[in-house]
Image (cartoon, coloured by chain):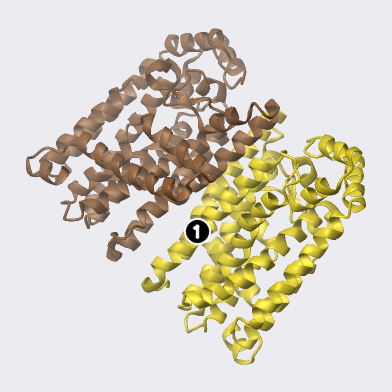
Chain colours: A brown, B yellow
């Protein structure tokens, strides 16, 4: 698919998604076979369910785009496996993230820890079932991380690229974990520090979700430092815009479309740029309301509506929309200067539009 | 050290421990340098603290013994790095295990999640601090797992051994995770099924702690399947005995010596062979007491004493001591038939004695 598509001057993004999903399905089918009816079967089922329930496959698609940006090559199977491995890594990150945030739903389905918890509720008390759910999901996440390495280390990865590839992936894994930690450490510490909030966005999303996947693909096609820098110039504004959109959807999105609760971020008291701007602009009464309500685990729809009003009235929502628009334009300009092949520019322009204008 | 020691017909076990600790210290010193005063510094500090607080280094020592058993070789640095990587993997497993079990102490120190929690307690409420502690420790464990791969993938690992080594390590990581899951799933499900309890022991400890470390070292020295089988013949009985001793220490040990609470296992309602034997032999009244008390999160010293009495009176404690003795003898017999070099046999005999007769 992709090899032909690039010859036709179009990168087939949905074809990439389908090819990556096939790699993932085959990998998990192998795990299911070796699991039989043993305890591993429970784990395979949950991971499969999460992947089948949806997801935009942003990271795999960008990985393959990075590969084309650097000229691609004969080893399409290699980059597809790397792309699928990034998706498994992301699945691990989501499983643990949901445990840490205590989220109930993801992609419109119960989160992993809630699935394990529900399986236990008949036989045990509520608290014990919750403990079992959390523990099982921690272990499931661990094994999914191990699988992401295993899928990557298949027979085809060229030894020559191993060292550079290892460095890029190592940076990605560290940044993803530290980004989550910064996010967690800042939660509940409500302030007007927009720069601090943007630093979390850069670690947690811009580098992990956009820059590193492009780099992984590019390195597999033998990219040098100039090409990697061109990827970065595109990735950081798009990544920041992606997370800023995510923050808006977390508060103003339709749960039916996002697959996530529109209360979780408010309950967690996430220190997003959206909230930082609102705190900067809020009057004394508004600031008091934000400080009192944000981060309350028991916050309900009524309190959420009050917070949303303040985010609107202070102009914080509009300001974040403008930050997204600025970064979108910056990403498009970087593509004009990138020197990437035309079909890659078209695809990355499309992706920049989708991730910044999305509603789910 | 070790290369000279083997020439002198003695494997210097404490020399191995010191050499592995040096590899770990250097690796973490590199991480500390790149962390500066950033958020990564918190993580490096906790892992360093855990490693410095103690630990028997059973897995690294066995890894180097497995290497000598297969004839060793010139690449001592390679096997030391693999051995250190096993210890980092184990550190990851302990961090998550303590979160899952809600344990307060490990090696006489607060567990990772309690350290993070304590750092937050001044500024946040008790529940929020606990949530922050749990979340941070999950992320710290994730990064420590990533580090265990990174340490292993240093410049020296011979490409020829990569595939077989990968298979052994993959099996180890899967078995460790599934063993924990089986343990968790069985907790609180009190019954007299000794065979089920022994299956958990085999996954969780015999394979993970003894067999796979020996295999990793042996594979690095180019071992064939016969030598790997000789490792297994020694490892499984020693590993079972190791865990049975651990179970006894978890209930009857001195917290001052073990570094762990003597209530945690009872509170978690761990389905150990010790408990299974007691349930088999208990009278109706004793069984009622066990069923009522085991697995109570609020269980105190008084209830623990009642359980200990029943474990004594039913003869369960003595029966488990006998199971340990049988396995110890079995391990020694397997060494006589192993064909391992004499210094390796001496070292493994010493290890079998230490892990089965230990008090900490």
Name the residue tied to disc 1: B171
- Total numbered badges shown on the rendered structure: 1
Q: Which residue is located at x 22 percent, y 49 percent?
A: A67
In the rendered image, the quadrant that contains the N terminus of chain A is: top left
> Position of B119 compared to B277: left or right?
left
Task: Give the answer, above or below, for where B13 lies relative to A187.
Answer: below
In the rendered image, the quadrant that contains the C terminus of chain A is: top left
Residue B350 appears in which quarter of the rendering? bottom right
Residue A162 % position (x, y) = 33, 62
> Position of A59 compared to B100: left or right?
left
Q: From where the camera sits, is residue A97 visible?
A: yes
Query: Residue extending furthest left?
Result: A8
Nearer the observer, A106 or B112: A106
Residue B241 appears in which quarter of the rendering? bottom right
Nearer the observer, B35 or A19: A19
The residue tagged with tag 1: helix, strand or loop? Answer: helix
Q: Which residue is located at x 32 percent, y 31 percent?
A: A56
Nearer the observer, B262 or A235: B262
Task: Give the answer, above or below, for where A57 lies relative to B47.
Answer: above
Q: Which residue is located at x 42 percent, y 68 percent?
A: B164
> Position of B273 compared to A98: left or right?
right
Query: Residue extending furthest bottom?
Result: B8
Chain to which mark 1 belongs: B
Residue A112 % position (x, y) = 51, 33
Q: Which residue is located at x 81 percent, y 45 percent?
A: B279
> Position of B146 compared to B274: left or right?
left
Residue A78 % position (x, y) = 26, 54
Residue A250 % position (x, y) = 44, 21
């Amino acid at each position: 698919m992709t090899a032909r598509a690039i010859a036709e001057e179009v990168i087939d993004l949905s074809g990439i998604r389908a090819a990556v999903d096939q790699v993932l399905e085959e990998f998990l089918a192998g795990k299911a076979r070796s699991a039989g009816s043993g305890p591993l079967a429970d784990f395979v089922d949950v991971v499969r369910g999460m992947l089948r329930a949806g997801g935009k496959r942003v990271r795999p698609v960008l990985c393959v785009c990075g590969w084309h940006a650097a000229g691609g090559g004969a080893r399409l199977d290699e980059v597809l496996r790397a792309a699928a491995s990034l998706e498994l890594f992301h699945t691990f990150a989501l499983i643990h993230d949901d445990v840490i945030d205590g989220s109930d739903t993801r992609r419109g389905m119960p989160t992993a820890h809630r699935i394990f918890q529900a399986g236990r509720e008949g036989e045990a008390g509520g608290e014990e079932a919750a403990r079992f759910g959390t523990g099982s999901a921690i272990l499931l996440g661990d094994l999914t991380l191990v699988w992401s390495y295993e899928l990557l280390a298949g027979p085809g990865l060229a030894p020559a690229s191993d060292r550079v590839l290892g460095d890029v992936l190592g940076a990605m894994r560290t940044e993803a974990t530290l980004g989550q930690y910064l996010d967690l450490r800042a939660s509940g510490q409500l302030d007007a520090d927009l720069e601090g909030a943007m630093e979390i966005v850069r670690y947690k999303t811009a580098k992990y979700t956009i820059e590193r996947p492009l780099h992984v693909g590019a390195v597999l096609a033998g990219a040098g430092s100039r090409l990697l820098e061109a990827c970065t110039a595109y990735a950081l504004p798009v990544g920041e815009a992606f997370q800023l959109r995510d923050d808006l959807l977390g508060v103003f999105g339709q749960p039916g479309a996002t697959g996530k609760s529109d209360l979780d971020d408010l309950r967690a008291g996430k220190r997003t740029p959206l909230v930082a701007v609102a705190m900067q602009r809020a009057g004394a009464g508004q600031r008091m309301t934000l400080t009192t309500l944000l981060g309350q685990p028991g916050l309900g729809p009524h309190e959420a509506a009050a917070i949303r009003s303040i985010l609107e009235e202070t102009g914080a929502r509009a300001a974040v929309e403008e930050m997204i628009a600025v970064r979108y334009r910056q990403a498009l300009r970087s593509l004009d200067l990138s020197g990437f092949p035309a079909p890659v520019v078209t695809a990355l322009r499309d992706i920049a539009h989708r991730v910044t204008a999305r509603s789910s």
